[in-house]
Image (tube, grey):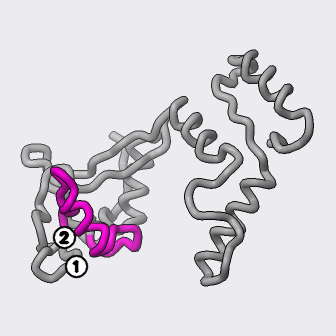
Amino acid sequence: NKADLPGARGRAAAVLTALPVHGAHVGVPLSARDEADAVRGHVLRAAGGSGSAAGGPPPGGAWACLRGALALRGPVLVFPVAEMVTYAPLPGMDGTAVGEASLPGAGTVSCLEAAAGGEAPTCWDRARGVYAAGGGSAAAALRDVLLMKPGSTVEDVFNTLKNRGALGGEFVRA
């Protein structure tokens, strides 16, 4: 966490060569000050100001730290479906598939389509240039995916879907 301090490089190298130790299998020298400066710059740029940090990944090894954590134990992918024959999506997930703020915009979709072999997202309506529940191939198999934490249970998936409004009722163990 203090990789930017004098003398830290030698100690960080010694720790990295000693791995695995005390259950740790991945080590990344990280500077909290550099990471905080990058976050501050990102917030200022997003607010319309002029952040001092350049765009791109934050310095100080934050991305390397996240990559190392994911390499240890990646997320569990869950594909909620309405039926197991056609793998049609849950009707309750239509709002998520067309209304999430994180969906790529028209410019990104055009870049995806222009790329070699690229396709627009499943619910993209090319005629109107927007996401629509009936647009594109809305009944595509395995359209939706949830990223769950490792070790998540069926009840965790149920609660996630319930919070998104895709399911209702109570979870009953049999």
Magenta region includes residue 107: yes
Question: Which kind of residue does numbered mark 1 sit on?
Answer: Val
* Circle 2 crowding by C-alpha within 10 Å: few under 14, some 14–19, many from 20: many
Q: Nearer the viewer, residue 171 or 167?
A: 167
Magenta region includes residue 65: no
Question: Which kind of residue does numbered mark 2 sit on?
Answer: Trp
* Circle 1 crowding by C-alpha within 10 Å: few under 14, some 14–19, many from 20: some
Quick one: quadrant of the C terminus?
Answer: top left
Q: Spatial distance from mark 2 to mark 1, Cα to Cα?
A: 6 Å
Q: Is residue 18 above or below residue 76?
A: above
Residue 125: x %, y % from top left: 15, 74
Residue 37: x %, y % from top left: 75, 62
Residue 92: x %, y % from top left: 25, 67
Pointers 2 and 1 in contact (C-beta within 8 Å): yes
Badge number at residue 124 = 2
What residue is at 34 percent from the left and 68 percent from the top?
103
Residue 106: x %, y % from top left: 27, 75
Badge number at residue 73 = none
Quick one: quadrant of the N terminus?
Answer: top right
Query: Which residue was labeled with disc 1?
Result: 130
Q: Is residue 34 above or below residue 39?
A: above
The boundaries of the magenta stretch are 98-123
What residue is at 65 percent from the left and 47 percent from the top?
62
Q: Nearer the viewer, residue 92 or 172?
A: 92
Q: Is residue 141 above or below residue 130?
A: above
